[in-house]
Amino acid sequence: MPIPLSSVYAFTKGEPPFTNCTPDFTDTLDYIFFSPTDNIKPVSFLDLPEPDSPDVAGGLPNYSHPSDHLPIGAEFEITRD
């Protein structure tokens, strides 16, 4: 039986428009998956720049982001029954 997985960003606020941004290709390539239950919930995540942000103008890498992929991250609350 497959484990049901969900993307943290899709589960909370919606997938970002991109996590990779180069002059020739921009799309969402990076995900944090978890199995939603009553015992594990995302409580925070890294905000990503908007497509029109000066941080990503001209593509990545750049001074603000030294990789062509944006950093993603999340914190989870884990509880016991």
Image (spheres, grey):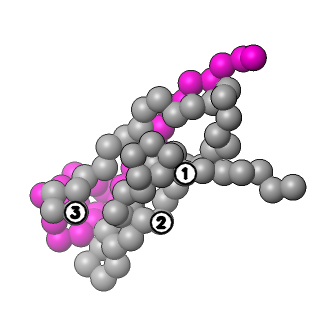
Q: Disc 2 versus disc 1: distance between alpha carbons? A: 12 Å
Single out the residue that lies furthest toward the front: 38
Gap between marks 3 and 1 measured at Cα: 20 Å
Q: How far across and down, in percent of the image, does residue 16 sit?
A: 37, 57
As drawn, the residue found furthest toward the bottom would be 24
Give the Cα separation between the discs numbered 2 and 3.
Answer: 15 Å
In this rendering, is residue 47 above or below 64?
A: above
Q: Which residue is mark 1?
A: 7
Question: Which residue sits at x=48%, y=52%?
Answer: 10
What is the three-letter code of the residue carrying label 3? Pro
Q: Name the residue beneath numbered marker 3.
A: 51
Left or right for 28, reference 48: right
Q: Give residue 77's position: percent from left, percent from top.
A: 56, 24
Residue at left 26%, top 78%?
23
Q: Which residue is mark 2?
A: 29
Q: Earlier in the sequence, mark 2 or mark 3?
A: 2
Q: At which x and y percent is residue 75?
A: 50, 31
Q: Which residues are magenta?
A: 54-81
- How many callouts does the rendering have? 3
User: Taking 35 as reference, is 42 above or below it?
Assistant: above
Q: Main secondary structure of the magenta part?
A: loop
Q: Earlier in the sequence, mark 2 or mark 1?
A: 1
